[in-house]
Image (cartoon, rainbow, N blue to C red):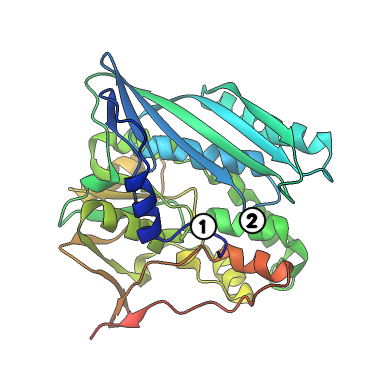
Amino acid sequence: MITGKLNWDVLAKLLKNNQGALRPEVERGGSVGEDCAVVNLSGTKLVLSTDPVTAAANHTGRIAYHINLNDIATTGAKPLGILVTVLAPPQGEISDIETVMAEISEEAKVHGVMILGGHTEVTDAVNRMVVSITALGVMDPGEKVLWTAGAEEGNGLLVTKALALEGTAILAQDFPERCREVLTEKELDEAKAFARELSVLPEGRLMRSFATAMHDITEGGILGALWEMKTASGLGFEIEAAKLPLRPVTRKLCAHFQLDPLRLISSGSMLMAVKDPEKALAELTAAGIEAHLIGRMVKEGGVLLEEGRRILVDPPARDEIYKLYDVEEGSASILPEKKEKPCE
């Protein structure tokens, strides 16, 4: 098997065939494109999500915290607590685990989130630290849960902040010397600081009454997130390349490492389908949150408009970031695969 997420077809089959016992309290469980499950407990809704961090060697705790709380944010729920599992390799140090937990605790205090428990273990089953978090959020009985499947034809598609923030931060933190080949020290520090912008909790709570669907942009980048929204909703998307927000240092690093920024892990940016893009943009701007209208939901297909061309977009096989770790381990080339093909 290759590194990265399982492809959509395999994942859908696994989920369909392995649900365990069905429970009446569960409003909806996980599925392709949906990162959260919702359990109704006498009116109060408990929202749950879980994810590990496997593609970062630095600031693993901070990244693990945000990718899980961001899943909670996509539903419009308020974060409550987290369970943390840390698997550390034998060659590591206790200080490594202390650093991870301190990062998680620091971020949790900011958002009023409690660390409820978890598991910590040193094991030769991993060769670098793996951190997995399960996040819990709550919603009041009258609040509506937003699902990725809720996107509607004609909805405008917004993204917040900039794309590939997480991927850029990982490149700067894990490969600083190679980054210095194209970045100044100031630019390198800027790229590392993107790790401080990974939360989408503010826009998640703000947009819960404006959006029909929200999805945090993680593995597979913006194109992966769009495909997950497309799959969940049964619709299609059409986006404009010129409107996709990428910061200059991200463009520099992706060109240098030969990575596609549109398929690069992008925690820190929320994808939102909204009925009234102008009103949603005004609300986000008033709250000091950068946002961009990049396209719309359509009846079917996935199209990227670029310099007068209509390019059909295929689902990404895996995130671009893994190509670098394959190279470091001597098992693959970093030359990116070209997945798009022109429309017929």
Q: Residue at x 45, y 79 (%)?
A: 338
Pick the residue in front: 35 or 29.
29
Pick the residue in front: 331 or 268.
331
Q: Which residue is mark 2?
A: 170
Asked if the residue at tag 1 contacts the one at tag 2, i.e. Cβ–Cβ closer than 8 Å, the answer is: yes
Would residue 159 be seen by someone viewing this image from the given angle? no
Residue 164 percent across, percent down from the top left: 51, 59
Mark seen at residue 265: 1
Image position of 80 (left or right of 12): right
Q: Which residue is farthest top? A: 42
Residue 313 percent across, percent down from the top left: 33, 72
Location of residue 123 by image quarter:
top right
Quarter placement of the N terminus: bottom right
Label 1 SS: loop
Answer with mark 2 or mark 1, whichever residue precedes in sequence: 2
Residue 157 percent across, percent down from the top left: 27, 55
Pick the residue in front: 144 or 127.
127
